[in-house]
Amino acid sequence: MRELFKLAVQAVIVGLALAFLLRWAWPGATSAPVTAPFSYASAVERASPAVVSILAQRQVIERVPFGAPLERFLGVSPQARVVNQGNLGSGVSIRDGYVLTNYHVVSAATEIAAQLIDGRVVRAVLIGSDPDTDLAVLKIDAADLPQAVIGEVAALQVGDPVLAIGNPLGIGQSVTLGIVSATGRRRLNISTYENFIQTDAAINSGNSGGALVDAHGRLVGINAAMLSRRIGAEGIGFAIPADVALDVMQQIITHGQVVRGWLGITLLERSGPAGAGSAVMQVVVEGVYPGSPAFLAGLQSGDVLLSIAGEPVLSADQFKQLEAGILPGRSVEIEASRAGLPFRLQATLTQRPKPVS
């Protein structure tokens, strides 16, 4: 009996030793398998009915070379003519016939049509747009229009699989697969307010305004742009987070525009002294618009912003978000410094002017 017990103990020790060696030699050999769907067909089936194709017609002025042979023969020399130009894009049905798309898809459009998943082509009416986020809201009168299921943008992680659904190059609805490459991408000079989801799912011309969905077919973004291969980019696309897009849509439906506070300054960032030989990033007033709230309050070019409405100013991007979140008509305290001397002033923000097209 004692010998059997001794043999059992030895077997356990040998087994543990082998397990340790196996784990050390092949770290992933004993870990639980990573589960992923064999197919994303169910996600596509869930999401694609809510994605529509957009055709926007606009009138453009086409320049004609002065003095072409035919014009000279006829004795006339028209220098310009108006022609109709079509622009392709995509959109996502959200609720009650409202469809989100990109502003640049429908900008200056004289007529907009939407093709649904079942092949129907219906007229779309522009409810409003927000060039600052490159978003627009359309209204479609169509029975039984499917609606997107909204996902949790905050839960997105780099490496999560995502699908881009749209109408690339007008060839018909298509789906591409990729991952979330990054979140919170800014300073891309695509729009005024940037907070993009970056993905390597293929996004081509015509995908703009389409859906970026997660592995369960839930909407997490509105596809907006891609970097061109002409600059050496490969697989770098961007989508506007769904929570941002939905907030813009609701404000357009409610107010006819997005309500944002505006102080009336342009900013730059520079390194400034922080004491003890160290440096800190400073947000500096580059320019002040005449007649703006900042101008009336007394802000000047060269002033260093320290806080607004009690919130510290940490970067130019962060300031723009703070500024936009203050309701027009509200008076706030601004802390700043001029020539190294701190000061405070009150400014009453107004509604941000619409960008000049």
Image: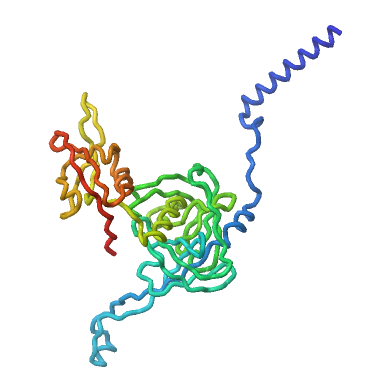
Taking the spot 19% from the left edge, 53% from the top edge, the residue there is: 292
Of all residues shown, which one is farthest toward the bottom?
A: 74
Q: Quadrant of residue 49?
A: bottom right
* Lateral position of residue 209 relative to residue 216, left or right: left
Of all residues shown, which one is farthest toward the right?
A: 1
Whole-percent x, y for residue 140 in the image: 49, 69
* Lateral position of residue 206 relative to residue 307, left or right: right
Q: Is residue 316 above or below residue 233?
A: above
Whole-percent x, y for residue 317 in the image: 31, 45
Whole-percent x, y for residue 254 in the image: 40, 59
Nearer to us in this view, 188 or 240: 240
Q: How many marks?
A: 0
Of all residues shown, which one is farthest toward the top?
A: 2
Whole-percent x, y for residue 135 in the image: 40, 59
| Color style of the picture | rainbow
Which quadrant is home to the N terminus?
Answer: top right
* Lateral position of residue 141 relative to residue 127, left or right: right
Taking the spot 38% from the left edge, 74% from the top edge, the residue there is: 110
Taking the spot 54% from the left edge, 57% from the top edge, the residue there is: 148
Nearer to us in this view, 190 or 347: 347
Which quadrant is home to the C terminus?
Answer: bottom left
Q: Is residue 328 above or below residue 136?
A: above
* Lateral position of residue 233 relative to residue 122, left or right: left
Q: Quadrant of residue 302?
A: top left
Nearer to us in this view, 173 or 317: 317
Taking the spot 47% from the left edge, 57% from the top edge, the residue there is: 203
Q: Quadrant of residue 22?
A: top right
Nearer to us in this view, 299 or 253: 253
